[in-house]
Amino acid sequence: MSAKLLEGKPIAEKIKQQIKQDIEGLGRKPVLASILAGDNAGALAYVRSQQKNAEALGIEYCLEKLESNITEAGLVDFVRKLNQDKSVNGIIIQMPLPEQIDYKKISSFIAAEKDIEGMNPQNMGKIVFGSAKILPCTPAAVMELLKETAVDLCGKEVVVVGHSEIVGKPLSLLLLDKLATVSVCHIGTSKAGKLEEHVKKAEVLIVAVGRAGLIKGEWVKDGAIVIDVGINRVADKIVGDVEFEAAASHASWITPVPGGVGPLTVTMLMRNLVEAAKLQK
Ligand code: NDP
């Protein structure tokens, strides 16, 4: 392997120090309300990790457990109450939601100044204008990883694979803001047989699909920076979307999976909470 390992944890630790200082500046513990409808095991694991992170930073984490048969109208009412509650600084809705609930619809009811996942249409829209104060967590985590490499994105060929609303779309706008030349690949690119061609030209490659081994190591350009957002369970191991070993022999930097984007994503959530508390002040 010739690439340097781009790990999320040390960067997260630095950002946590800043978060702690900001919390001292606030003069009170910020409060995060976390809505969990039902008892999905994956959601519960994510809640525990958030809770641990929050408590270590001096953030009050209020878990709001709701029945899995809650109606959409009932959940909207609950969100509205939290919007009006002055003691609550940020709201997060745990996924997956019960099937009768449409996440997009519910997230649009979270007050923009309390939307610490950055998924409310108002916060998403601000990304287009380059004025967003609260960014979606995973794209923000990727931007922090890129900052660590000290790459100047201006004019760089950046290829984003995956165009989801939570990762690829907002991320490509953040990269455009840095004057990168951004190509966004998706299922249409793969169907047209053009994924390899695009990946091969990437000076910075960011992959967020959720398919182990989708990106072949030999496609990675020499010296490229590779950020693998994907999380896949393969034979009891967690792997990304990029063939790690083969890609690492070409790349200059590469994120491990696990240990790359993941540890930063939850830190970005806490940073957003503090940012929200500052905006509310
Ligand atoms: P989605 O399923 O919402 O999006 C996947 C994207 O990949 C879609 O744009 C889809 O296109 C595209 N895609 C699917 N198949 C192909 C293909 N063969 N070639 C090219 N593009 C393809 O997933 P998310 O964005 O939510 O997450 C992506 C991955 O990142 C997952 O593994 C997830 O677990 C992980 N993740 C990791 C986080 C972290 O903190 N590390 C946080 C968030 C996500 P289309 O919609 O057109 O089919």
Image (spheres, rainbow, N blue to C red):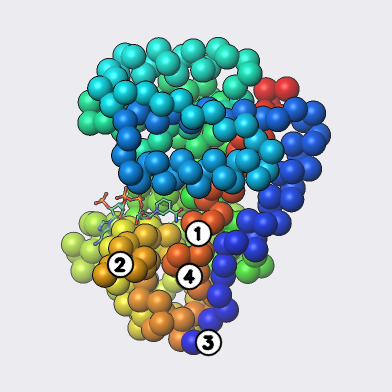
Q: CA distance from mark 4 to mark 3?
A: 14 Å
Looking at the image, which is closer to me, 70 or 240? Answer: 70
Q: CA distance from mark 3 to mark 1?
A: 20 Å
4 or 2: tag closer to the N-terminus: 2
Front position among marks 4 and 3: 4
Q: Residues within 10 Å of mark 2 (few under 14, many from 20)?
A: few
The disc placed on residue 231 is none
In this rendering, would 44 be left or right of 18?
left
User: What secondary structure is found at the residue carrying circle 2?
Assistant: loop
In this rendering, would 180 be left or right of 212?
right
Q: Is residue 275 visible?
A: no
The disc placed on residue 261 is 1
Q: Residues within 10 Å of mark 3 (few under 14, many from 20)?
A: some
The amino acid marked with disc number 1 is Val
The amino acid marked with disc number 2 is Asp
User: What secondary structure is found at the residue carrying circle 1?
Assistant: loop
Front position among marks 2 and 3: 2
The amino acid marked with disc number 3 is Ser
3 or 1: tag closer to the N-terminus: 3
Q: Is residue 119 visible?
A: yes
The disc placed on residue 236 is 2
Q: Residues within 10 Å of mark 4 (few under 14, many from 20)?
A: many
Indicate whether 212 appears above or below 97: below
Q: Quadrant of residue 77?
A: top left
Residue where numbered disc 4 is placed: 256
Indicate the position of residue 214 as horizontal and vertical percent values: 28, 69
Q: CA distance from mark 4 to mark 2?
A: 17 Å
Q: CA distance from mark 4 to mark 1?
A: 8 Å
